[in-house]
Structures are given as C-alpha cells and as structure tokens.
Image (cartoon, rainbow, N blue to C red):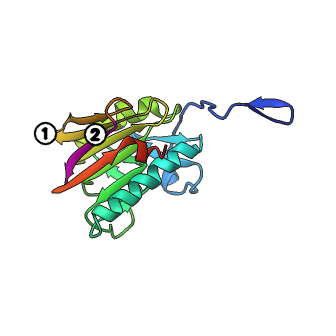
Amino acid sequence: MSSLGGEPVSAQREEPLRRVRMSWEEFLDLPEWPRAEWVDGEVVLLVAPPVFDHGIVQTQLSVLLTTLFPEKYVVPEVFLVLPRNRVRLPDLMLVDERPPDGWVRTAPLLVVEVLSPSTRSEDTVRKSMEYAAGGAGQYWVVDPELRAMDLWLNVDGEWDLLARLDDRQPTATVQLAGVDVPLDLRTVLRD
C-alpha cells in the first residue's frame, strides 16, 4: 500500500462496473475515456484502468499472434458489435479483415479477456455467452491473479474447453484458424 495525501491506496483497488441507461446516440457521443460498452440500452462503464499485469498479457499475446498470423489483424480494445443490441470492447481480438468503419462486425477468430477484480464476472459469465452467440471461434480467458489461462473453442454456440494452463500445466499447443499456437503461461505472464 502507498499513500496519497495521507490516505492509504491499494494497488488492487476493486471498483465495480457502472451501468447507466443511455440512448444509442448518447453512447456514440461518449469520449474515449472512460472506456464503455453498450448492452441492452445501458452503457457499461469500465471505470478502473487496467493494471500493469493486464498490459503485459495483452502485449505478450499480441506479439505471439502477430508473428503467427501476419495476414490477419490483432487488435486490442476495439469495438465488437454482437447480436441482441450489444457492443463490447474485448481486451484483444484476432480478425480476418480490417473493418471499414473501425468496428468489428464479423465474428472474430479469437477474443481474449484478461480478468481483473472489477470485470471478472462480466468477462466470465455475460461476455462469454455473448461472444459465443456472436460466433467468435475461440475465447481465451487469462487470470493473472490466479495464474491461469482457459482456452475455449466455440462448438455450435457453446464453449468447449481446449486447454487450461496453470502452474502445474503451464504449456499447451492449440489449433487456431489452421495454425498451431504454442502457449506458455510463464511467457504470457512474463515471469
């Protein structure tokens, strides 16, 4: 813990997501910060900025995927338009083509979420179902705090576990878009 103005400040401060009823037009007029998603007529404000480990995971996976998929696009925090009136902001996506308006409207090959205390249930429950319904090919969930990574394959709109990486089993190779992807949790977390 550190101190700002005499008040103790925790590096792991947990702030809940904030939900605000808002029209589509109001959502489109929001500034870039705070980051926000659109779900059923509500804006989900992602009020806590990502922590250092979150950025490490995004960077490590971006480098790996860009190297393995030079013809595709690896993008962090870009809007993904999903069925049933939803717009999400995944931590990382792998997509086939550059969208003309900057918003991904076709099913991504891969969606990655890096868990944090303020988004854990949103990422593992709500978003996972939405990404499956939206046709994402795979969903990778990285939990830096628990030192784990779950790799899911979309089979008919349901997630099927391909592999779980943790300290006991830190490596796996999975097929993604016809390419073998070797993963090592120690590299992803940059131990």
Q: Does residue 149 show up magenta in the picture?
A: no
- Which secondary structure is most common in the magenta stretch? strand
Residue hosting label 1: 156
Image location of residue 164, percent across then percent down: 29, 33
Residue hosting label 2: 151
| Left or right of residue 119: residue 65 | left
The three-letter amino acid code for the residue at tag 2 is Leu
Q: Which mark is residue 24?
A: none
Q: Earlier in the sequence, mark 1 or mark 2?
A: 2
Q: Is residue 135 above or below residue 163?
A: below
Image location of residue 93, percent across then percent down: 35, 54
The three-letter amino acid code for the residue at tag 1 is Asp
Image location of residue 176, percent across then percent down: 21, 52
Label 2: which secondary element: strand
Q: Is residue 145 above or below residue 113?
A: above
Give the alpha-carbon distance from disc 1 to disc 2, as whole Å.
16 Å
Q: Residue placed at 27% from the left, 54% from the top? A: 108
The N terminus, quarter of image: top right
Image location of residue 190, percent across then percent down: 48, 46
Let me know if residue 146 appears in the view.
Answer: yes
Let me know if residue 24 appears in the view.
Answer: no
| Left or right of residue 3: residue 116 | left
Going by the picture, which residue comes out furthest to the left?
A: 156
Q: Is residue 79 above or below residue 11?
A: below
Q: Does residue 175 show up magenta in the picture?
A: yes
Q: Residues within 10 Å of mark 1 (few under 14, many from 20)?
A: few
| Left or right of residue 107: residue 114 | right
Q: Nearer the viewer, residue 130 or 38?
A: 130
1 or 2: mark nearer the eye: 2
Read off the magenta span: 170-176
